[in-house]
Structures are given as C-alpha cells and as structure tokens.
Amino acid sequence: MSTIVLVDKTGQISQQAKITLDTIGLKAAITSLFKEGDELSLIVRITSYETENTTDAFIKSITLGLDDGTGTPAYMKRYVALMTQTADNDPVATELENDLGTITWSRISAGVYDGVLSGGNLFVEDKTFVTRVIESSATEQIEVVCERVDTTTIRITGMQSQEVRDQLITDVPIEIRVYN
C-alpha cells in the first residue's frame, strides 16, 4: 500500500490519503484534497506487503496552483500530443493533455504542418514554449522542429538529413506550454 503524506510549511501533517496509485493516481489524490495556494511537501510512504516496514521518500516542496481542478498549474496552459503524419495527409494528433483549446492541424507543404488554435490569440511571444525533437540513428538524423508562427499558429517541420519531407512523424511527442 502507498500512503501520500502531505506536510504543510510548518512541518505538520496537513492531510494524509491512503491511495492505490494505479487506480486513483497521484494527481487526482492531490487535487481532491487540496486547494490552490496550499503550501506543502510531498512525501510518499511505501509499506512493504511482505515485512510491513515503511519507507518515506521526500519528493518535493510545492505550492499548489491548480486551474479549475485539472491539475495544470495556474501559471501555464499545456497541450501534449503524439503526432503522426502519413503520405500527403494532414497530421493526426493523439491528444494526451489539452488545456489550450481546439488545435486544427493541416499540411501546408511537404514536411510542413500548421496547428491553428480556434477562438483565441493564446500563443503569446516570449511566453510560448514548444518542443524540438531530434531522433538519430547510425545512418541518419530526423529532426522535428516546432515553432510559434503567430498568436494562433504553431508550425511543425519534419526534416531528414536537412531535407524537409513528409512521412517522418510517427508518434512524435509534441508539447506546447503557454505561460501567464
């Protein structure tokens, strides 16, 4: 059994939740017990089934900044997806997390794809972070570059050995963060 022990800034146990991590999840447990602005330390207490000995592992001191119960910090919004593109089709995003809104992905030209955010000018200059992925093998290098184009558009470019082309993106992780 795992017990999450959350200690407030004075060192006192403020809440304790016995959870099974594979059923409820850490994020769900924390967001159900605490509110935005709470200051606490996260300690995971693990009890051995065989010996019933317990071990505490200090994880991190945190101040919760939750946005409407989603678990995303209030100081940022995030989009995480696995992108795949085949032939000359538009890329397909398997969204893992999306606090930004609807992003429509389309193929602009060979190896160049734009994601346009519906209903907002959220991709603010100097406050938008996007990933850059480089995959290398012994014989070739594949690079997927993500960049902010303007306040509504993110561009993904797939290159192999410096040549921009299609069919290089298969389950490539993409992350977009927008900070307040």
Image: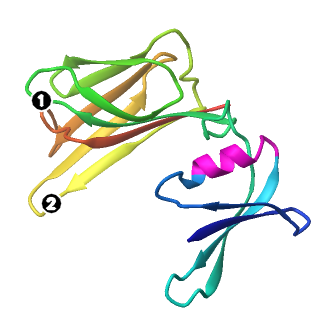
Residue 125 percent coordinates (x, y): 57, 26
**Residue annotated with mark 1:** 86
Does the magenta portion include 86? no
User: In the rendered structure, does residue 31 fall within the stretch colored magenta?
Assistant: yes
Looking at the image, do the residues carrying marks 1 and 2 touch, with CB atoms under 8 Å apart?
A: no
Disc on res. 101: none
x and y, in percent, of residue 9 in the image: 87, 62
Mark-to-mark CA distance, 1 and 2: 21 Å
Q: Quadrant of the N terminus?
A: bottom right
Q: Residue 146 or 103: which is nearer the viewer?
A: 103
> Residue 153, how many percent across, how many down?
42, 19
Give, as a single range, the part of the protein colored magenta.
Answer: 27-37
Identify the mark nearer the N-term, 1 or 2. 1
Magenta segment main secondary structure: helix
Residue type at numbered disc 1: Thr
User: Which residue is at a point 8% across and 59% down the rendered structure image?
Assistant: 139
Residue 137 disc label: 2
In the image, which is nearer the foreground, mark 1 or mark 2? 1
Q: Disc 2 marks which amino acid?
A: Ser
Residue under the point 61% across and 41% down: 71
Of the pair 122 and 48, the residue shown nearer to us: 48
Q: Secondary structure at mark 1?
A: loop
Q: Is residue 57 above or below residue 119?
A: below
Q: Relative to 157, is 142 above or below? A: below
Q: Residues within 10 Å of mark 2 (few under 14, many from 20)?
A: few
Q: Residues within 10 Å of mark 1 (few under 14, many from 20)?
A: few
